[in-house]
Image (cartoon, helix red, strand yellow):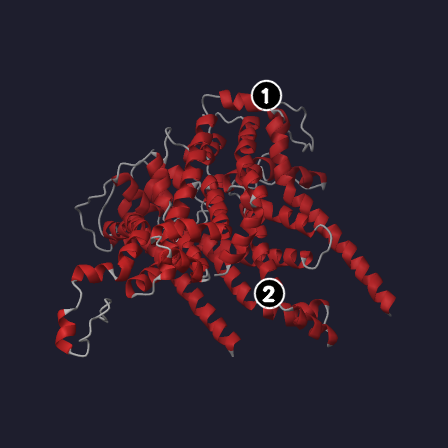
Amino acid sequence: MSVPAEPRGGLTLEPLAAARRRPTWGRRLRGRQDRHLWFGLFVLPFVAGMLVFVYVPIAWSAYLSFFDARATVTPTKFVGLANYSYLLTDPEFRSSLLVFIAFAVLIVPLTYVCSLGLALLLSGLRVAQAFFRSVFFIPTAVSYVIAAMIWRISFFNGGRFGLVNSLLRQLGGSNIDWLGGANYGYWVALVSLRLWLQVGFYMILLIAGLNRIPSETYEAAAIDGAAGWRMLRYITLPQLRATTAAVLMLLLINAFQAFDEFWNLLSGVNGTYPPYGRPPLVHLFVISLGGSNQDLGLGGAGTMILTAIIVVFGVAQNWFANRGADREER
Amino acid sequence: MRSVRSRADRALLVVRYVVLGVLAVLFLLPFYVIVRNAFASSKLIAAAQWNWLPDRWNFANITELFTNSDVEMGASLWHSAVMAVVQTALTVVVALLAGYALARHTHRVARLLSALTIFTLMVPAAVTFIPTFVMTSALGWIDTFRGLIVPGMFSAFATYMFRQSFLGFPRELEEAALIDGANPWRTFWQVVVPNSMGIVGAIGTITFIGSWNAFLWPMLVTRTGTRTVQVTLSQFMTSQLVNYPELFAGALVAVIPVLVVFLFLQRYLVQGVETTGLR
């Protein structure tokens, strides 16, 4: 532990001399050639920023969550677990968790299948591969606000205009009120929007995964007569297992944070939000910061609950990743 | 046998290109809709019958947008540009320094900080927006560039990525510089960083696009003084004064910077996605 860093004199074998020459605290703190000093200098901005803008706020929020903190950050009325018990028994908060689950159940498998489909369609193409890859990847650069604008006004407009209703009428159907909440049409808009925006990102990840599969594996399987579906089922998918696990977990964590497209597709005039289609972050925003009266105690409790959920995801991901790595080593 | 097989292969290849072509049109359709709506009239955008072509190419929509005093498009673009450029630069510098130190030191404190960074990686900033908002408003930073930029510039993600990248950076280069008498600070900026531009470009591009497109945080902390273009467009869309051609002209103007960055830095972006998505 306390190996002296200084080069010692000739009497090093004698314990007393060594003790006398032990470097001072200041010297040890700075380290050999001031190594520790440099280390501190390099990490200081990041560590200080993380403390001030991540950890202190979370601790403060945890503190606020035990108080009646309406429109104040220095509350006095201790309420114990009342904010937590309110949220956990609140049907609206629970339904926001259900909205997340429904969204995840739709978007996670759909994005994976579509991204993999695109990656496989592109793999091995000689002509125009880079062009198609760019076309599918380019929506990643567009913001959810702008995508929601197109979806809401020109594609899935609830009124008589909009591309989808126009097509429906040509096919003999009638207009559908897509976003009004009278039906589940808004899910079509939400899911198709996010698919368009993020499929290219995961396609790139899966292309990288496909490129890591050694070509000898395919050649050996082809000699054994594997092709098409069987090749995919028995060679490609098993070899992609690590990439798949990472992609699915990223998709799940991103679905948990959904806010922008829900807000911009469904919110009404001047920042009002309808009672349906509220994922956790939207619900937390509405009950804690959205109104004229800020309820930071409730917001703090909600943040703690959502953070706990996402940490569970993270731990599960690490567990799966380690398990997968163990398996591959065997 | 052989010729039958190759003919089937060729047919399959044609099918693949047809499918890809149809999908490409579908993926580009939203971009076309932005352009169509940005130059069309309100009447066309709200017409019951869908029209593929605008009724006119009216470039006045753009000038009307910038002279519309309810929208403040010019100021919003400026705020977004300041935010995206400054936040990208500061995020990259802070994360570069920390990532380098965490890669080169193995003592207890460094290991603890690395573990803390990975733990922070698990908790996305979006989930803790209320605590960060409480802190930012306690500092009196609402509607300032500080409030817009600083809370989001300490990226555990970027730090972790740089750390991973520096773990594979050859130490011999640095050691040569150190022996020549350069201190770690100079060695870092003159030897390490210039040889790491690939990962810097990748993280920088991802950060820039994320910053330009950010919505939730800017919506929380900006008022008239620093409102970004995404927030302005969102509020214009849901206001009673909305004018569809002007709105889409705004979308067109707001999407061009990221598309330019995307087209020029796509190589870095692809590399970034590949190295970052799978740690």
Quadrant of the rendering where the N terminus of chain A is positioned = bottom left
Residue A11 image position (x, y, % from top left) = 17, 76
Residue in view at x 20 percent, y 44 percent: A74
Q: Nearer the viewer, residue B197 or B117?
A: B197
Q: Residues within 10 Å of mark 2 (few under 14, many from 20)?
A: few
State whether residue A118 is above or below residue A228: above
Q: Secondary structure at mark 2?
A: loop
Q: Secondary structure at mark 1?
A: helix
Residue A148 image position (x, y, % from top left) = 53, 40
Read off the residue under disc 2: A212
> Mark 1 falls within which chain?
B
State whether residue A123 is above or below residue B190: below
State whether residue A105 is above or below residue A70: below
Q: Kindly report the distance in space between the C-alpha atoms of the residues bearing marks 1 and 2.
A: 51 Å
Q: Nearer the viewer, residue A218 or B105?
A: B105
> What amino acid does circle 2 point to?
Arg
- Extreme front residue here? A10
Residue B203 image position (x, y, % from top left) = 47, 50
Q: How many marks?
A: 2
> Mark 2 falls within which chain?
A
The answer to whether any part of residue A160 appears in the image is no
Q: Quadrant of residue A307?
A: bottom left
**Left or right position of A231 against B215:** right
| Residue B60: image tag | 1
Tell me if label 1 and label 2 are in contact, CB under 8 Å.
no
**Left or right position of A26 against B143:** left
Residue in view at x 72 percent, y 52 percent: B19
